[in-house]
Amino acid sequence: MATPTVTAALNGSVFAPGQQMLLTVTYADADTQVLTLTLVITDARGNKSAPVEAIAVIDPLTLTVTDDSGRVWARVSDNGAVAVYRSVA
C-alpha cells in the first residue's frame, strides 16, 4: 500500500481575532483505484436486462482537519485532490 501524500497552506501566517482563515489541502494516494462494475442479468430464455453500472473506490482517502485550539474547520470544497477549509481566528 502506498502512503498518502499531503500538502497544506493557509491564506496567511498572522491573523487578527475573528479574521477568516482559509486552509488549502492538496492530497493523493498512488494506489487508490476506482472500479467500475457493469452488470447484465440474463434469464433462462436469454432475455437480457439493460446494463447498469456500480462504482467502488478501493483504498479511499479520508481528510480530517483539527488544530490544537479545538477550532472548528468547515469544508468549503473538495474535489478529491484539493480541499479548502475555513475557520475563524
Image (cartoon, rainbow, N blue to C red):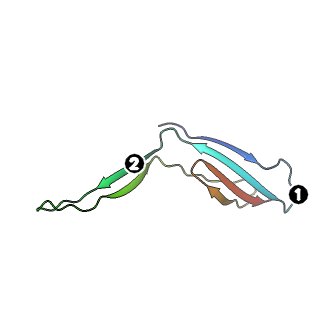
Q: Position of residue 39 (x, y in %)?
A: 29, 56
Q: Quadrant of the C terminus?
A: bottom right
Q: Position of residue 70 (x, y in %)?
A: 72, 59
Left or right, 7 with respect to 11, comes to: left
- In the figure, 39 relative to 81: above or below? below
* Front in this rendered view, residue 1 or 56: 56
Q: Is residue 83 visible?
A: yes
The amino acid type of the residue labelled 2 equals Leu
Q: Nearer the viewer, mark 1 or mark 2?
A: 2
Assess disc 2: are there few (<14), some (14-19) or many (≥20) residues with their C-alpha within 10 Å of its C-alpha: few
The answer to which image quadrant residue 5 occupies is: top right
Residue indicated by mark 1: 16
Are circles 1 and 2 on residues that touch, CB within 8 Å? no
Q: Is residue 68 visible?
A: no
Left or right, 33 with respect to 28, comes to: left
Task: Tell me what residue is drawn at x 49 percent, y 49 percent.
Answer: 60
- Give the CA separation, mark 1 to mark 2: 46 Å
* Front in this rendered view, residue 65 or 78: 78
User: What SS does tag 2 mark?
Assistant: strand
* Front in this rendered view, residue 44 or 84: 44
- Picture disc at residue 35: 2
Q: Position of residue 58 (x, y in %)?
A: 43, 47
Left or right, 73 with respect to 40, comes to: right
User: What SS does tag 1 mark?
Assistant: loop
The amino acid type of the residue labelled 1 equals Ala
Residue sitting at the far right: 16
Please state the total of marks drawn on the protein image: 2
> Tag 2 or tag 1, which sits nearer the N-term?
1
